[in-house]
Image (spheres, rainbow, N blue to C red):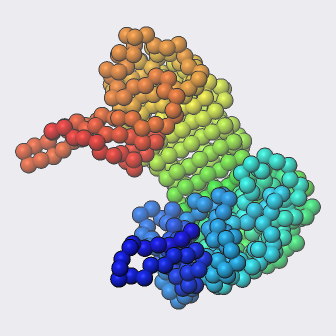
Amino acid sequence: MSLSGPDDQNALISSGPIDALPVEILTKIFVELSQNYIKTVCKEHNSHPADRPGYQVSSCRCLNWDPHSEQIPVWDNTDVCTRYPFPSALWDVSNRWRTITETIPSFWTRLVIFVDSNPTPLSWIARALALSAEHPLQVNVIRREHTYSCSDPDERDRCRAVIALLSPHFHRCQRIHFDVIHSSSLPSLITDFGRPCPLLHSLQLVCREDDGDAPGATNGSHSRNEGVLISPALRVLEIDGRNFAHRCRHGLQWDWKKIIHSTLTSISISNFTPSVSITEDLLFSNQDLLQFLQGMPALKSLSLSNVEFVAKREGEEWAGFVSLEVSHMVLKDLKRSVFSSIASGAMVMYGDSLQIERCEVSNFEVISPRSPSSYTILVDLDKGVNIGTHLLGWAGASLRVERCPSFNDDTLKIFAQHGCPPELLSLEICDCPNFTAKGLIRAVEKLGWMPLLRVSGQMLPEKPTAEQILWLEKHTWEFDWNVRQSHMACRVKFFLLVTRQSGTELVPVSCFVRDHPGSWRDTLSLHKIHS
């Protein structure tokens, strides 16, 4: 690569390889390039911009981090899974470029560590930790995407070697992200976090399967120490169920909750089945889970996926109903005992969205929205589940039903007979073959109108007649039958109630809806207003 300038009689023209530039110039070029990956946020609100909607960030041109500064660097992780995450592409060019990048500590504050069969060398990890000086760290311990389906009995040993290098530096981590196959490959919240983590705002310890061993343990047993994860800035917690259960029951039962309850905005717990060979597995119950979740004022998002806790601890007494309010809730692959404890043991109210997928659901268990704008998704519910029962007390705005064989004309009669839900704005039906166009018309007729009605998928009932399609098009603002895309942009027509000095009038509006209609308030892009 060469540099050249315009032909100017007053300028001395020279050209040469970029590697011949002075160190100061190359350093400035590298720092400018880093603007694509590193931003800064205020230390007082130590969190990633993605965790705080509307949060203002600025470019980071810091060569060295001042621990007394109000600004700290935060990485954009869009390049984590690329072949050469920054600054690897610079580091590999030449010895000179390598030397220059190694003089800029902020370049080494994001570690991307692979623990598959082609692991990141431990020497490189140790070198990067040294080069980062005392800057805040963001750690990603992952596998290459194509290796998650592979058998890997040595993954835990590789992870333990990595954790041994990282754990002395956990106290300066902003974000710790593990995504591995086995639960035992993860760090233990009890044995691997021995110092306070004042900067930690996001802790993601994710495994693809529960292998029956405790994280950080051998033969399913902990070597107990007094290490306590103290993380007063923690906002995002994504964790395997065994790690979560063991940490909650360790020492003072709820000491951890006292530390994080006022800041935590998102909790995701996944992949855990209690093992009779691990004592700690049997000390955390469904009621303990609800007690932990109760009274978290900042909690907005809750996800439970493929987790199973003991139904009742020995000697446990019922503690009464708990109140749980969140904006977004996802329940996936839950056994009946877990789902029942949530639906029956707590006053659960969700504000914006609820997704129930492949759960063992009783016909008498209903989780109701607290907001009339709520979006509910029901996916892969067993044919024995009476969806109509759930809709009797439901009052949301948007409903999507996907691969639920029990969604039929009897379900649609709930709309026709009870006028429920009264505020329904959109209904999406995907791969549900057991209803008819006649039943759909009866429901729409009872409701009077519906802004968005969409039927899609491979498994569909008999197609409506031309007359039925015409009727549905006339009584809905947007009607689609057999649209392949589950989420698409479409034009929606509705009215705005506008108050002027001269009086009140209805103004028809045409706009585009992107993604699912449950997020209309967030995704509407006003297209045109006709006066």
Q: Residue at x 51, y 32 (%)?
A: 485
Q: Quadrant of residue 318?
A: bottom right
In the rendering, at what x and y percent does residue 37 appear? 54, 68
135 is higher (above) or lower (below) than 371: below
- In front of the other: 256 or 450: 450
Q: Is residue 436 visible?
A: yes
- In front of the other: 515 or 244: 515
**Residue furthest out toward the right:** 219
427 is higher (above) or lower (below) than 434: below
In the rendering, at what x and y percent does residue 444 appear? 39, 23
In the rendering, at what x and y percent does residue 507 appear? 20, 38
Q: Quadrant of residue 281?
A: bottom right
**Residue furthest out toward the left:** 502
Q: Is the C terminus in the top left, top right, bottom left or bottom right quadrant?
A: top left
In the rendering, at what x and y percent does residue 350 appear? 50, 49
**Residue furthest out toward the front:** 9
Q: Residue at x 22, y 36 (%)?
A: 508
Relative to 356, is 447 on the left or the right?
left
- In front of the other: 153 or 16: 16
270 is higher (above) or lower (below) than 12: above
Q: Is residue 259 visible?
A: no
Q: Residue at x 52, y 51 (%)?
A: 328
Relative to 494, is 227 on the left or the right?
right
Q: Is the N terminus in the top left, top right, bottom left or bottom right quadrant?
A: bottom right
Relative to 17, is 120 on the left or the right?
right
The tally of labels here is 0
